[in-house]
Amino acid sequence: METINSTPVSFSESAVAEIKRLYTEQPEGKFLRVGTKGGGCSGLTYVLEFDDKKPNDEVFDVEGVPCVMDQSHGMYLFGMLINWDNDLNNRGFTFSNPNASKTCGCGTSFAV
């Protein structure tokens, strides 16, 4: 398994803390998948879930949590910041993507 030296996306401190918390609840051998899939009101939707490694995945590490991203998704996500909000009005992961030409109001869908 080859690990890339730099992370294609970055995580805020609060996102890292929440990901580490969630990671402790996962079965052994799972990876945090960062990616995209078709759908949503803007065309593409962000994927952030625990999953198995697949053949086209690049592996990277976020403070001890093994992460994967399909090689083809890098062009859409490179340089993105993932944050965790946990306040009264907002709770969940948010995505700040410099590659998005358009985003939707919910913040989980984008276009390039």
Image: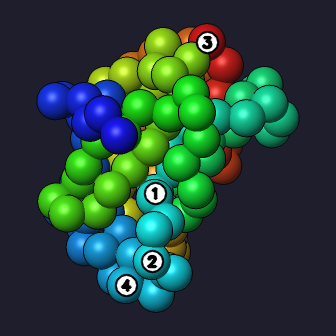
Residue identifier under label 2: 28
**5 and 21: which is toward the camera:** 5
Q: Residue at x 61, y 47 (%)?
A: 47
Farthest bottom residue? 25
Mark pair 4, 2: CA separation:
9 Å
Mark pair 1, 2: CA separation:
12 Å
Q: Amino acid at mark 3?
A: Val
Q: Mark 4 vs mark 2: give the one in front.
A: 2
| In the displayed structure image, the side of residue 82 where residue 64 appears, left or right | left
Q: Where in the figure is residue 34, as x and y percent of width and height?
A: 50, 44
Note whether 87 is above or below 77 in the view shown: below
Numbered label attached to residue 42: none
Q: Is residue 18 visible?
A: no
Instruction: Decide which of tag 3 and tag 4 comes sooner along the chain.
Output: 4
The reply to whether discs 2 and 3 touch (Cβ–Cβ < 8 Å) is no
Q: Residue at x 73, y 35 (%)?
A: 37
Residue identifier under label 3: 112
Numbered label attached to residue 24: 4
Q: Amino acid at mark 1?
A: Leu
Mark pair 3, 4: CA separation:
34 Å
| In the displayed structure image, the side of residue 17 where residue 27 appears, left or right | right
Q: Residue at x 80, y 30 (%)?
A: 38
